[in-house]
Amino acid sequence: MASKAYIGLGSNLGRRQETLRRALDLLGKRGRVHLRALSQMIETAPTGGPTGQGDFINAVAEIETDLEPGALLAELQQVENLCGRDRSSELRWGPRTCDLDILLMGDLVMRSPELTVPHPRMHQRLFVLRPLAQLAPQVVHPVLGRTVAQLLAEAGGGRK
């Protein structure tokens, strides 16, 4: 049975927008993930991590998939690798060519050593909430019990 999920996308190395578009294309060609909607791509300053890195391009994709969460994570990581990501040489929250994160997967709540859904910090990150609110402002965070629009406003992103 297919389920709806939201994937966060980010890149701050190389041809950022092209890389994210390529990642979505590669993900779709693998056959188990179907893109339903894509937010606008926004430019954001890095949060945390080493200083001096370039700005990110961030977006959120609404997908439909029949993959289980662990299998979806594996697909996302394979696509990241195809787009030039090398986790072995990265610093935490440092620059990266392609970052794909499962934000929400229906009303699923899970925690394992490899994956936590919903994404554990999504409600604190404007670079996630702003594009997610474009696609799904009324979706309720299954742990916090508040809509994406409410989380955005609470994080200070609802202001003009």
Image: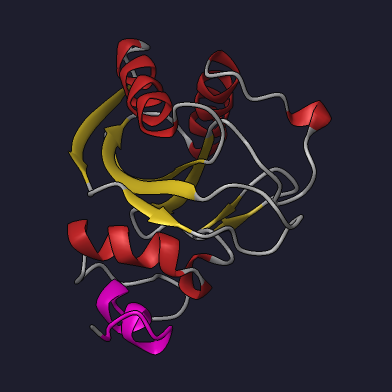
Front-lying residue, 14 or 145: 14
Considering depth in this image, is 80 or 72 the residue closer to the camera? 80
Q: Position of residue 149 (x, y in %)?
A: 26, 77
Which residue lies at the image location 36% right of the left edge and 33% below the top edge?
Answer: 17
- Evaluate whether residue 146 shows in this view: no
Q: Is residue 96 above or below residue 27?
A: below
Name the residue located 48 percent from the left edge and 31 percent from the top edge.
72
Residue stretch rendered in magenta on the structure: 147-159
Q: From the viewer's perspective, is 91 left or right of 1?
A: right
Q: Nearer the viewer, residue 125 or 42?
A: 42
158 relative position to 83: left or right: left
- Can the viewer see residue 99? yes
> Would you place residue 60 above or below residue 18 in this image?
below
In the image, residue 136 sits, relative to residue 9, either above or below, namely: below
Image position of 91 (left or right of 11)? right
Seen from the viewer's position, the closer of residues 130 and 115 is 130
Assess whether residue 158 is covered by the magenta stretch: yes
